[in-house]
Image (cartoon, rainbow, N blue to C red):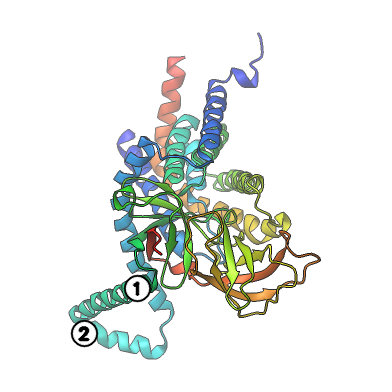
Amino acid sequence: MKKKGLFSHRPVTVTIIAVMVLLLLMLITSGTRTVSWVENAVGVVVTPIQTFAQTVSNAIVKGVRELFNTTDADKENAKLKAQVAELEVAVESYEELRQENERLKDLLNYADSMDSGTEYVTATVIANSNSVWFDMFTLNAGKNSNIDPGDPVVTGDGLVGIVTDVGATWCKVRSVIDGDTKVGVIVERTRDNGFVRGTLASGSGDDKLELYFMPSGSDLTPGDKIVTNGLGGDQIPKGIIVGTVSEVMRVSGTGTDETNAVVLPAVDFLHLEDVMVITSPGG
Amino acid sequence: MAKRAIPAIIISALICIFLDRIVFSNFNVLGIRPDMLMGLTVSFGILIGNTRSQIICGAIGMLYDILVGKLIGLNCAVYVVAGLVAGFFFRKFYTDNVIFPAVVTLILSFVRENILAAVVAVSGVQFNYIMMLFTYIIPCVLVTALMCVPLYAILKPFLEQYGKYLSDKSASLL
C-alpha cells in the first residue's frame, strides 16, 4: 500500500492554503490603506462591548491597586468604612467622577493652549495590544467623529501616538513608543532638530524613546525637553511635548541613525484612559 | 456531550479574550504576560482536534488583529498553525497528563514570539535579540506554559468526552 505523504493530509493542505491567504492579507494591509467594511463592521459591533469591559476592568484595577497600597491604618479604616458601605459607594463614585473631571480638565487646559482653529475629539482607550513587539491601542471614536489616519493623539502631558486605521466608531493608534514610530522633534533649549523613535519596551513600565539624527555639535543635557517640530512629514503639529532627555550617548558620528540620547516619554502609557485626537491642526 | 462542551468552549474563549485583552494588559511584571489564547489553542487541539481548534482560535486571532493588530492576519495565521500542530496529538496520548500540553504550549509560544520578533525586525525596527530573548521571550513563554496547566485541567472534564464522541463519529464516517 502506498504510504501517505505529509501533504496528503487534508488539514495540512487546508492550513497551508489558509496561511498563504493570510500572508497575502498581511502584505496588503501592511501599508497605508482604508479599513475594509468587514473590519469596520466588526469594530462597530465590538466597540461598545470593549468600552463596557474596559470600564469594569478599570474599576477592578483601581480597587486592586488600592488594596495593595493599603497600610495597617488603612485596613483598620476600611473596617470602619464597611459600616457605612452605602456612603462609601457614593464616595467612590464621586471620586471616579472627580478623577475623570480632572483628566478632562487637563485635556481642556491643553486644548485651550493649542493654536486657535485647532479641532479635536476626546476619546477613551478601549483596548491595547498584548505584547512588547507592537504598541497599538484602540479608541472609541472614529470616522463619525472626523478622525482620519495620520491624526495625532495627545493628552495633557504630551504626544501619545498617531492614528493608523479608522472605522466608523473606532480607530487604531500606533503609540509613540512603538518600535515603528518615528517623529520629527526639536530640543526646546537648543532648537536642534532630530527624530525620536520607539523602542521594544512598551507596556513594561520601562517605556523610552531614542533621539537620533541630531546635527553635529548638538549640545544635549539630561533634562532637556523634547517637543515635536512639525517637520516630520506627518500631520503632527509643532510644539507638542514628547519627553525629557534622561541619558546622553556619545556616538562616533552625528547626523546618523545612531542613538544620541534616551528620552523618557512625557505620557504615562501604563495608565492611559482619556486622550484627545487632533483632527485639524490650527494656526 | 455537546450540551456541556459547547458552553465550555464559548465561556473559556470569552474568559481568555478578557484575560488577554484586559486583565494581563493591566497586570503584568515588566511587560511579561501569558498568551492565554495559545494555551486555549493547544488545549482545544489536544482535547477536540485540530479543525475546531483552528477555526475557534483562528477566529479569535483575527479578532485581535482587527481590534489592535498592526498586520491583519498575523495572529490568525499563528493560531491556525498552532491549532494544527496541537491537533496532531488529539487522542494520541493520555489526556490526564497536564505536562504534555504545557510543553506543546511552551514550544508553540516560543515559535510565536520568534515569528513576531522576525516581523518586527523585517519592518526595520532595531533591537537586541539576545536581550529580548532573556528579558521577554523566555519569561513570556514560561508564564504561558504555566497558565496552560490550569486552563487544560479545567477544560478537560468538559471536552474529553466530546472529543471522544467527535473522534468516533469521524471514524464511523470513514
- Tell me if mark 2 has few (under 14), some (14-19) or many (20+) residues whose alpha carbon lies within 10 angstroms of its own: few
Nearest-to-viewer mark from 2 and 1 = 1
Report the chain holding disc 1: A
Residue A188 horizontal side relative to residue B54, left or right = right
In primary-sequence order, the first of circles 2 and 1 is: 2
Residue at x 46%, y 37% (from the top left corner) = B58
Q: Quadrant of the N terminus of chain A?
A: top right
Residue under numbered circle 2: A83
Q: CA distance from mark 2 to mark 1?
A: 44 Å
Camera-side residue of A54 and B49: A54
Camera-side residue of B116 and A114: A114
Residue under numbered circle 1: A112
| Residue A89 appears in view | yes
Q: Quadrant of residue A30?
A: top right
Contact (Cβ within 8 Å) of mark 2 with mark 1 = no
Q: Which label number is shown at residue A228?
A: none
Q: Quadrant of residue A45?
A: top left
Camera-side residue of A154 and B17: A154
Residue A112 picture location, percent across and down? 34, 73
Question: For the residue marked with disc 2, what is the amino acid?
Answer: Gln
Question: For the residue marked with disc 1, what is the amino acid?
Answer: Asp
